[in-house]
Every structure is written in structure tokens, then in C-alpha cells.
Image (cartoon, rainbow, N blue to C red):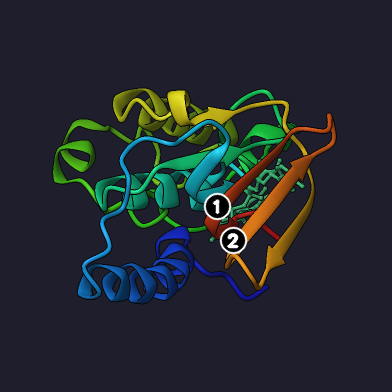
Amino acid sequence: MAVIGPTKFVSAIQNQLLGKTRKMSATQEKPSNKSAGSNFDAIVVGAGFGGLAMLHRLRKQGLSVQVLEAGTGVGGTWYWNRYPGARCDVESMEYSYQFDEDLQQEWEWPERYSPQPVILKYLNHVADRFDMRKDIQFNARVKSAVFDETTNRWTVTTEDGAAMTATYCVMATGC
Ligand SMILES: Cc1cc2nc3c(=O)[nH]c(=O)nc-3n(C[C@H](O)[C@H](O)[C@H](O)COP(=O)(O)OP(=O)(O)OC[C@H]3O[C@@H](n4cnc5c(N)ncnc54)[C@H](O)[C@@H]3O)c2cc1C
């Protein structure tokens, strides 16, 4: 199986978005820090490794972000897959975030290749440490994402009928 660490995966999406957000600051458009009702700068679908990293990065750039997650908690793969023996086959030092030096220094990996409960604990710790839950809606399965070329905005709807719009829509929905 070809394996790609979450850091590389996230970098790929981030680079795409960074290009857009840099362009935005070059044209002197100011991103809003607060969302107005159901309108956001960015909507991220999924709260796994990829979605949490996107939330962190986009918030740091001053964008208002709403993460929509079908499950009731963060973790993605590591939230859904709880079968005995589930663990990563990449060393946890590599299979973890590198966007914050303090986070890296304070977190202790008890094993070289972590089992699922430890990875899920780590991702919950990250969500708490960076106060991410306030921008995540759980139990929110996205049904559609439609781009309107006249307004240049995405309209994202969830299965319960809620609709929201954003300039950027990131599908961090895994494989
Ligand atoms: C046992 C196991 C071991 C693994 N080991 C490794 C490893 O060692 N190294 C490695 O690189 N990778 C490994 N992986 C792969 C792993 O999936 C990725 O590393 C990584 O966790 C993917 O993160 P992600 O955020 O991209 O997606 P996910 O973790 O899959 O998160 C996607 C999230 O999107 C949500 N979602 C999907 N569709 C919707 C929707 N329509 N609306 C709302 N929410 C939605 C899901 O509920 C989920 O929470 C392993 C996977 C498993 C199962």
C-alpha cells in the first residue's frame, strides 16, 4: 500500500489554499474574522487529520471557518475504526502535526507505532488545545456542495437541510 503521512497530505491542500489566500491579501481584500450567520470564508468537510489541520491553518490566516463532520467527534479514520489491533504503520513522530513546536514538545507518544486509541486521544487533545470545537459542527453530514459562478461562492447543504455559503470549500473527507 502506498502510504502518505498526514503532514504531506495536508501540505498539498494547504499549498492550494495558500495560493488563493495570498492572492486575496495582495488585492487588499480583508478576510472577516467572524462569520455572518451562515456565511463563512471557508467550509471544511471532515474533522480528521486533514480537516483539523485546515481549520488551524485557515483560522491563523484570519478566515472564518466552519467544519462540518458527519460523526459525533473529531478523529476521522481514528474515530470510525476502533477494531482491535488498529494502529498506524508510520512512526507516530512522523504521523502527527508539525505546525506547533509546543504541541510537539509536550505530547508524549508511549509507543513508536501508536494504536488507534492513542491516536484518537492525540487528535482530541489537539482539538481541545487549539479550541477547535467551537468551529466544528458534529452530526452534520454534507449532502451537496454547489459553486455559483455569479457570486463565486459555494453553497453547502447538510442532510438535515441546513445551508451555508463560503468562498472556499475544502473536502477533507479522506479516501
Ligand atoms: C487502521 C488504519 C491504519 C492507517 N495507518 C496509516 C499510516 O500508518 N499512515 C498513513 O499515512 N495513513 C494511515 N491510514 C490512513 C488514514 O486514513 C489517513 O492517514 C488519515 O487519517 C486520513 O485523514 P483525513 O483527514 O484525510 O481523512 P479521514 O480521517 O478519513 O477523515 C475524513 C472525515 O470526513 C468525514 N466525512 C466524510 N464525508 C463526509 C460528509 N459527506 N459530510 C461530513 N463529514 C464527512 C468523515 O466522517 C471523517 O471523519 C490508516 C488508516 C487505517 C484505517
**Residue topped by disc 1:** 166
Q: Residue at x 41, y 49 (%)?
A: 53
Asked if the residues shown at circle 2 and circle 1 are in contact, with their CB atoms under 8 angstroms apart, the answer is yes
Q: Residue at x 57, y 70 (%)?
A: 3
Residue 10 image position (x, y, % from top left): 45, 62
Rendered-image quadrant of the N terminus: bottom right
Residue 83 image position (x, y, % from top left): 75, 33
Amino acid beneath label 1: Ala
Q: Which is nearer the eye, 60 or 38?
A: 38
**Is residue 79 placed above or below 59 in the rendered structure?**
above
Question: Does residue 85 appear left or right of residue 170 in this picture?
Answer: right
Q: Is mark 1 within 8 Å of ligand 1?
A: no
Rendered-image quadrant of the C terminus: bottom right
Write down the quadrant of residue 76 in the picture.
top right
Query: Mark 2: which secondary structure?
Result: strand
- Residue extending farthest to the front is 150
Question: Does residue 80 appear left or right of residue 143 in this picture?
Answer: left
Circle 1 packing at 10 Å, graded few (<14), some (14-19), many (20+), is many
Circle 2 packing at 10 Å, graded few (<14), some (14-19), many (20+), is some
Residue 107 image position (x, y, % from top left): 26, 32
Question: Does residue 62 appear left or right of residue 116 in this picture?
Answer: left
Q: Residue at x 67, y 23 (%)?
A: 72
> Between marks 2 and 1, how big is the CA–CA gap?
6 Å
Q: Is mark 2 within 8 Å of ligand 1?
A: no
Residue 114 image position (x, y, % from top left): 48, 40
The image's mark for residue 21 is: none
If you read the primary sequence from the N terminus, does the residue marked by circle 2 or circle 1 appear first? 2
Amino acid beneath label 2: Arg
The image's mark for residue 153 is: 2
**Is residue 16 placed above or below 58 in the rendered structure?**
below
Query: Mark 1: which secondary structure?
Result: strand
